[in-house]
Image: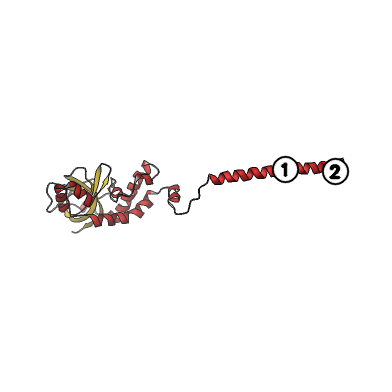
Amino acid sequence: MAKNSIPTRFGAILSRGQVVGGVALIVLLGAIALDTTAVRIGSDEDIREQAFDPDIFGQEQFPRIREFVAERAPEAADLAQALADDRSAAIEAYGTMAGVFPVMAVRFIGVVGEGRSGIFNVDVDGLSGVTIRVQTGPAINGTELRDVVGDIEFGAFTNQIEYQDAGSGINRAMASDVLDGLEREALSGTTISVTGAFTLINPANWLVTPVALEVQQ
């Protein structure tokens, strides 16, 4: 009887060990579950967790930015007069505050003058006291296109670098869509039609980033 009782006691001890181990496993799995957040594919959380691609972002955002600017842009002479008459009202009607300075929408037709590094002066009829320049690339600088719509905000991005990259991605998407194939060397002396945006830092000097540019002759 004593010999037969040894396996029985061992089996009881083993069973208790298994139970304890099972309980510990359940507790561990519960802790993992509490510390885990389910992320739905396509949700904002899912998008943030994926690696940010500024070029994909730019391609997605540029069409609506172009539409926004085109719908809001006044003629350059009208904008200059509106700013002179009532700056605050003009900014509210045609601009978007982006930090200290507003970003303004504008459209114009003019004759292209001298250019340097892809930036050309444009002589616009009926506009006095204001110099207009337009960026034609290949490098497009600034964050006007990112900021003009007013809803692409820093808080939606991981850090400042990603936020800056978003602006660069939009600029590249614009350049690919609007400026690809533009003959910059032959641009001086031609008449162009431009719709775009600029940061109103110097009211007498507008550097416009286009969302649409057409060479008329």
Question: Where does the C terminus fall, quadrant-wise?
Answer: bottom left
Q: Residue furthest bottom?
A: 216
Q: Nearer the viewer, residue 162 or 18?
A: 18
Amino acid identity at mark 2: Asn
Q: Which residue is label 1 attached to?
A: 16
Q: Classify 159 as above or below 184.
A: above
Q: Secondary structure at mark 2?
A: helix
Q: Is residue 133 left or right of residue 152?
A: left
Locate residue 27: give its quadrant.
top right
Residue 134, how many percent across, how many down? Answer: 22, 49
Estimate the spatial distance between the alpha carbons at disc 1 and disc 2, rounded to whole Å: 20 Å
Amino acid identity at mark 1: Arg
Residue 68, how many percent across, how many down? Answer: 28, 55
Q: Which residue is label 2 attached to?
A: 4
Q: Nearer the viewer, residue 27 or 43?
A: 27
Residue 61, how many percent across, how many down? Answer: 34, 53
Q: Nearer the viewer, residue 188 or 135?
A: 135
